[in-house]
Image (cartoon, rainbow, N blue to C red):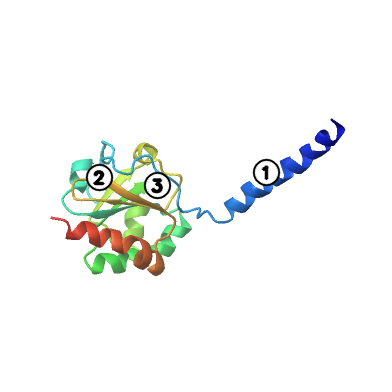
Amino acid sequence: MKRLVLLIPLLLFLGMAVLLYRGLFHDPSELPSALIGKPLPAFSLPDLKEPQRLLTQDDLKGRPALINVWATWCPTCKAEHQMLNRLAETGVVIHGVNYKDDSEAARKWLADYKDPYQRNVVDNDGSLGLDLGVYGAPETFLVDAQGIIRHKYIGAIDERVWREELAPLYQALESKP
């Protein structure tokens, strides 16, 4: 019995070592989303460019698109913004969700740094972000033409992320009839 008690710390150590070892190989940008395969959540929120106009999830349908959650207070959003502008120039449809931000600051930011968004939803209180399961900005959702969420990416989109992960998915959705 004494020997069995002596093995308990060893077994606990080995169990924790296995868990920590497995964690080394997980990509933190790949958090599961319960919304994959489901439609965009219903919303009715102001348009950043025309605040008197309300946008809904139906306004983001029609073509496959990236839906980028961003804010002026987010330094990583600024880092990815140039890439979003390049993508928009090549014809990639990008909609924005301005998340928990000051709308006036957001409009100035887009005027200063160029606006890659075809539509930009104002989510001042974070209600749409909450419904999307947003942890913070930036996060980007890939939706099909019917507004079904097909993929979620957490973090800044750069050339490698676009080329290796998002472009193949986007192009596959674009080629579907």
Left/right placement of residue 91 relative to residue 80 reads: left
Callout 2–callout 3 Cβ contact below 8 Å: no
Quadrant position of residue 176: bottom left
Quadrant position of residue 91: bottom left
- Nearer-N-terminus badge (2/3): 3
Q: Residue at x 68, y 45 (%)?
A: 16
Kindly identify the amino acid type of the residue bearing the numbered disc 3.
Answer: Asp
Secondary structure of the residue carrying tag 2 is: loop
For disc 3, the neighbor class at 10 Å (few under 14, some 14 to 19, many from 20) is: some
- Nearer-N-terminus badge (2/1): 1
Q: Which residue is mark 3?
A: 101
Q: Which residue is mark 2?
A: 148
Q: Residue at x 33, y 51 (%)?
A: 151
Residue 41 vertical placement versus 48 (above, below): above
- Nearer-N-terminus badge (1/3): 1
Position of residue 89 measured from the top left corner of the image (x, y, whole percent): 24, 68
Q: CA distance from mark 2 to mark 3?
A: 26 Å
Q: Which residue is mark 1?
A: 15
Kindly identify the amino acid type of the residue bearing the numbered disc 2.
Answer: Ile
Camera-nearest residue between 158 and 2: 2
